[in-house]
Image (cartoon, rainbow, N blue to C red):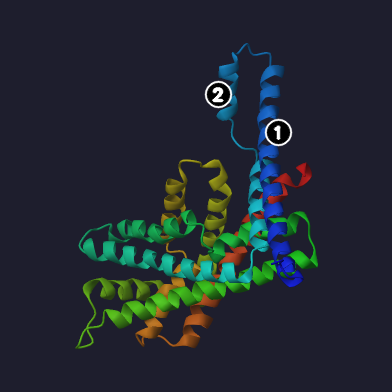
Amino acid sequence: MHDSPKGASKDKPRRFDRTQSLEQKAEQKAEQKAVRESAEREIEDSGATLTRKEKRQVTDHSRLSALTVFSIIRREGEEELRRPSSSLWWSGIAAGIGISSSVYAQALLYETFADHPYRGLIASLGYTVGFVLVILSRLQLFTENTLSVVLPMLSEPSWMRLGRSGRLWAIVLTANFIGTFLTALAVLTVTQGVEGQYSSHVAAMLEVSEHAAEASGFTALVKGIPAGFFIAALVWMLPSSKGFELWVIMLFTGLIAAGGFTHVVAGSTEMFMLVVDGRMGVAEAFYNHLLPTFAGNVIGGTGLFAMLAYGQIHAEI
């Protein structure tokens, strides 16, 4: 039995996507080869008397140029912009659930080291757990996209790219919020005892959440700017950090917690826990905390880091 024309038409986009993927991989390999050959030519032009093996070692240990890093992240951003809405949606929900483990791990250390003079600093290490999970799992976290999907628009501005970026931001941020809300709801509902008492771990999560809620309004916005900048810097550094991704993620996300800066997605877990527990209203959570933090993260990630990153390579494109 022959396939119907309708069925054949459905297969065309799939074949087209696979062709595009193969072409992108070929372009990436060609670019890596060009970088390698350029480094080898520089070694030869320097007049250094090195063996072939030594030349290869020098090439392998050469740092990626800013333009190369920009090209890698821009390509990743273009791939994200072309992904189906359903893929972004489910990945965003998974990221929201995953990032909530930051609050749990932070609260666990906060409770364990209750009498330690550096209790807050030690608990900051727990804050890194969710980011490690989400970033290394390649899930859709909104603050990562303040850099990756913006670079393609900066390099080739168009209304279509702007629309695609807005679409991705809206889908991912909404999905992240749903993931964190579901986690907060599940944690507080499942762990509540007969007399309405929570376990010590959950009580610690609520205590950490109340501490995070102290930053509101303009303060939350200002503290969101460094957090957005650090996450964008983290995304920029990952291509040059092969083998050390874990430590880079822990360094910058731990710094966010230790510095008391605000992150819109991880912070939404804390705000939603307070909302579900009845300690905060929904309007207060959004208008006093999440929206100012969102603005700060965008200013830091897109307004500062993305613009600076593009500025340093603009003349080389």
Kind of residue at disc 2: Gln
Question: Residue 93: image x %, image y %?
Answer: 49, 71
Q: Viewed as shown, does residue 284 lie left or right of 80?
A: left
Marks counted in the figure total 2
The answer to which of marks 2 and 1 sits earlier in the sequence is 1
Q: Which mark is residue 34?
A: 1
Which residue is denoted by mark 2 in the rendering?
A: 57
Cβ–Cβ under 8 Å for marks 2 and 1: no
Tell me: residue 306, above or below residue 85.
above
Q: Say few, some or many: other residues with alpha carbon within 10 Å of mark 1 (under 14 / 14 to 19 / 20 or more).
A: few
Q: Is residue 130 visible?
A: yes
Question: Residue 144: image x %, image y %?
Answer: 56, 60
Tell me: residue 53, above or below residue 242.
above
Q: Say few, some or many: other residues with alpha carbon within 10 Å of mark 2 (under 14 / 14 to 19 / 20 or more).
A: few
Kind of residue at disc 1: Ala
At horizontal 49% and vertical 56% (from top left) the residue drawn is 135
Along the line of sight, which residue is nearer the eye, 82 or 66?
82
Question: Residue 69: image x %, image y %?
Answer: 63, 44
Mark 2 and mark 1: span between their CA atoms? 16 Å
Q: Quadrant of residue 193?
A: bottom left
Q: Secondary structure at mark 2?
A: helix
Along the line of sight, which residue is nearer the eye, 34 or 7?
7
Q: Viewed as shown, does residue 257 lie left or right of 300?
A: left
